[in-house]
Amino acid sequence: MTFRDVIQTGLGNLWRMKLRASLTLLGVIIAIAAFVSMLSAGAGMQKKINEQFDKLGLLFTIQVSPIHQEDGNDTSKVAPLNDSTMEIISKLPGVQFAYPLDDYKIVASFNDTVINTHGQALPIRALNTKAFSTMSAGKAFDSDSVKQTIVTDEFLEDFKITEPDSLIGKQLIVSIEVATFDSALVHIFMDDGKLLWNRLREIRFDSLFNAGYRSRIVQRELGAAIGRFIDGYLNSRTTVSETLTIVGVLDESREHLRIQPVILPLATAQKFSSAGFSGDMTDLIASLSSGQLFQSSGMESNKNYSRVTIDLKQGYSHKPVVDSVKAMGFRAFSYAQEFEEITKFFTYFDMGLGVIGLIALFVASLGIINTMMMSITERRREIGVLKSLGADEREIKLMFLVESALIGSIGSIFGILFGWGISRVASTVAKSFMVRQGEDPLELFALPLWLIAVAFALGLLVSLVAGYYPSSRAARIDPVEALRYE
C-alpha cells in the first residue's frame, strides 16, 4: 500500500462513520479552541508590552537615583548624585551617555495666556533616542545652545490647543523666579528701611560687660539676622526670562517616563540654573549642605539631582552597569531587568493556561481512543483481508495511525480557527468596554505563528499518542481469526 492509499482509506473510513467521527472531531476542536483562545490572551498582552518597551527604547535604559535617609542609611555616607558622579557614570563600560532629571517651576506665556507649569532640560543626544523620538509635530532641537523649545501634549491641554502643527514656529516666553544669596544678604543689612548700623545704635555698649545682657543681645540679633536672611531669600526674587521658538511637539503618551510640559535645551536651562535657586526651602537646605549657597552665577554648578538616566550602547548587557552603579552607592533600576521578570511571569502564565488546554486535549484523546477501538472491532474482517493480500503489521499499524492523525489534524485546523474567532469576539467586547470607560481601545489578543504551530503540533501529537495502542492492537490481529469474524 502506498501512503496515498493509506490516506484515502483513512478518509473513506471517517466518511463512512460520519456521526462518530464528527463527535470525535468536535472534542478535538473544542480542546484546541480553548488552548488557542486562552494562550492568545497571554500572547496579546506580552506583544503589547514588548512593543511598548521597544518603542520607548527602555531595554537600553537604566534609572539611577540617590539613596535617601529613610532607607536606614547613615546620611554622611550617602553619595551625592551630581555632575561629578554623573560624569563618572557616563564613562562606565557600555554606557553611551547619561543625563539628569533637571526640572523646575516656570511661567509660560503664549498668545497672551500665562500659566504656571514645569520645565525640563534635556540634551540633544537624549532627544535622538527612542524614548523621545515620537513627535506629534515638528522636530527636535538643532543643538544644545539654540533658543528653541519642545512642548508636550500636556502643554497643548493647558493652553487648550487642538492642532500640534499650529505651534511650530511660534514664540514662547519662559520665565522663572529665582532667589539669590545677594538678595538674602541685603535683607540682613536693611529691613523695612532700617539699616544695620541704626540697629547697632540701639545697643547699650556699656552694658555688654554684663553676661546676661550680652547673651540676650546676641540671641536677639542673631535670630533676627537669620529671619531676615530667609525672608530675603524666599520673598525677594529675581525674574529671569527667555524667548524661545517652539520647534516640536512631543507625544508624551508613555507611562514609564516622566516628561515635563516644556523641554529646554541645556544652554537655556543652565542660564536659569546659574541665575539662582528656585526659592524653595528644600533648595536652600540642599544648597547649604552642598556648599553652593555662596556660589556665584559664573561658577560651575555641581547641583544634586533626583535622578539620572543612563542610555546603554547597543548590544551591552545591563547587569555590569547596574552592579557598578550600585557599588558607587546609588540605586539602579533597569527596565531590561523588569522586562525579564515580565517575560518570566508570562512564561508561567502561558504554562498555566496551557495545562488547562492539555486537560481538554486529554479528554479529547479518550474520544479518539474510543473511536479507533470501535473502528478496529467493526473492521476486523477488512484487516484479515488486507493481511491475506500481503499487508504486513507495519502497514496495518500505519493505516490506523494515519486515520487517528487525520482526526487530530482536521480537528486542530478547525480548532485554531474557532479559537481565533472566540478571541476576536472577546477582543471586540473588551474594546467596547474600554471605549465606554473613556480609555483608548487596546488589542488584548494575538495569534502569533508559534502559537498556531504549537496548537497544530499538539493536536497532532495527542491524536497519534491516542491512536498508538489501537493501531498496535489492530496490527497484531490474526488474519485467520479475522476472516472467521462475523
Image: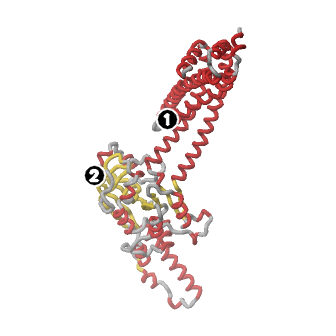
Q: Is residue 114 above or below residue 1?
A: below
Q: In this orientation, does residue 283 appear? A: no
Foreground: 266 or 208?
266
Residue type indicated by callout 2: Lys
Residue 154 badge: none
Assign a secondary structure to mark 2. Answer: loop
Assign a secondary structure to mark 1. Answer: helix
Residue 159, position in %: x, y? 36, 48
Which of marks 1 and 2 precedes in the sequence? 2
Identify residue for label 1: 449
Q: CA distance from mark 2 to mark 1?
A: 49 Å
Residue 78, position in %: x, y? 56, 69
Q: Report the residue that reaches farthest toward the top.
A: 486
Residue 170 badge: 2
Numbered circles on residues, count = 2
From the image, state whether disc 2 or disc 1 is nearer to you: 1
Residue type indicated by callout 1: Leu
Is 74 on the left-hand or right-hand side of 197?
A: right
Identified at 37% across, 65% down, the residue is 270
Foreground: 127 or 206?
127
Quarter the C terminus occupies: top right
Q: Residues within 10 Å of mark 2 (few under 14, many from 20)?
A: few
Q: Is residue 4 above or below residue 172?
A: above
Residue 382, position in %: x, y? 64, 13
